[in-house]
Image (tube, rainbow, N blue to C red):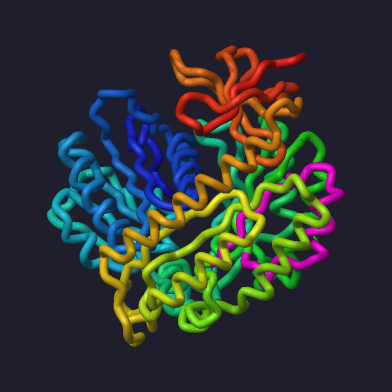
Amino acid sequence: MIDTTVFQDKTAVYYTLGCKLNFSETSTIGKILREAGVRTARKGEKADLCIVNTCSVTEMADKKCRQAIHRLVKQHPGAFVVVTGCYAQLKPGDVAKIEGVDVVLGAEQKKDLLQYLGDLHKHEGGEAYTTATKDIRSFAPSCSRGDRTRFFLKVQDGCDYFCSYCTIPFARGRSRNGTIASLVEQARQAAAEGGKEIVLTGVNIGDFGKSTGETFFDLVKALDRVEGIERYRISSIEPNLLTDEIIEYVSRSRSFMPHFHIPLQSGSDEVLQLMRRRYGTELFASKIAKIKEVMPDAFIGVDVIVGTRGETAGYFEKAYEFIHGLDVTQLHVFSYSERPGTQALKIDHVVTPEEKHQRSQCLLALSDEKTKAFYARYIGQTMPVLMEKPKAGAPMHGFTANYIRVEVESDAALDNKVVNVLLGDFNEEGTALKGTITQ
């Protein structure tokens, strides 16, 4: 039994890097600590406890993690510092040596955070607790709101794919998930707390069911029946796991939005093979065509990596032309970063940093062109928008069903409400359509 009296009236700060899944897990850690008596430190207040949830998807992510730890140690002298997340799992020894770090927790340990805190007295040196990747088995549930309107429901963790450039399977372990029954219950609880929208998160959510003998399609159908939740969004799903059956169901679903996020990574079949991806451009194009056939208004976001080993100028040109021809809405562009222990390091032809930057800028410009063209199609239409809590002195924002960002005059009473909005022209920054509420 953990003595939680040591946590009473203690304060904590939280810092999260990386993906939506990390933010969801940090929120769950915060909930665990609040239930033990720890409150979130106010702005400018020195905290007793610092929690850093790290990312390690790129070398830059590792650097940002180290910088965040140093900054928090300096801002909160004497605080007990806990580091978890992917960087902590992959490089526990390195993280434990960072000055000020007390405890490093791997993927299997983060859910049992309290038992590693002791009496919050600082250590002489950092102590690392991790489990070998092959032995990571547990699934830690997480359904969090944080400070946002929407909830993030973790449905799956880990990955069995082992793409040549990626360390995620080593940081997160093998694919595993919660049961449909447990996830439906979490969705019901979110609805009871006033949640209107849930984003399904995970590492490879289309692989859902490996540990429970269920399927992602079964999960989608079960969640669609949860009363009170008006909107679901599928955060990211591999194209080879996005079945026509799922696409068709979403097109007629009560609550699953016409919004997909699909990783492509490269528009060159040769590079996809080097990456050890499980599909080719023909399959990817067929998925986009299927979505647009049954949901012409669907927003489609696409992940692309530039500058991977083996991506010659010719292969990039081929990839650009393929992506240019896709009816997608937005590109999330990442520059390849070499990760220790990955198979990609064995591939010849290294792309220079200058070439990576140039290719990235090229695709970002294409993305901006596609996104603005998509938004422009809806100017003059009235669409339901789920409004989000405004920041002080700033306009209010929300999203349409097909993920168009809308800006309206601030009104705190509209927070977490779905209202009809007449969509006007772009705002000054070009990041949203200005709207007028019609109800």
Q: Tell which of 343 and 405 is nearer to you.
A: 405
Residue 66 visible in the shown view: yes
Q: Residue at x 49, y 62 (%)?
A: 304
Estimate the x, y position of residue 382 in percent, counting from the top left: 76, 25
Q: Tell which of 10 and 291 is nearer to you.
A: 291
Asked if residue 242 lies in the magenta stretch, the reply is yes
Estimate the x, y position of residue 107 in percent, counting from the top left: 43, 63
Estimate the x, y position of residue 55 in percent, counting from the top left: 37, 57
Locate residue 224 relative to residue 309 in the image: left or right.
Answer: right
Residue 85 visible in the shown view: no
Asked if residue 133 lies in the magenta stretch, the reply is no
Q: How many marks?
A: 0
Q: Tell which of 108 and 350 is nearer to you.
A: 350
Q: Residue at x 17, y 49 (%)?
A: 100
Estimate the x, y position of residue 131 in percent, counting from the top left: 39, 71
Splitting the image into 4 quarters, where does residue 383 fall?
A: top right
The C terminus sits in image quarter: top right
Q: Residue at x 33, y 67 (%)?
A: 337
| Residue 335 vertical position relative to residue 167 in the rendered view, above or below | above
Locate residue 229 relative to residue 281 in the image: left or right.
Answer: right
Splitting the image into 4 quarters, where does residue 176 fall?
A: bottom right
Locate residue 364 relative to residue 378 in the image: left or right.
Answer: left
Q: Residue at x 76, y 55 (%)?
A: 292
Q: Tell which of 266 and 15 is nearer to you.
A: 266
Which range is magenta? 238-264
User: Outermost residue, right direction?
Assistant: 252
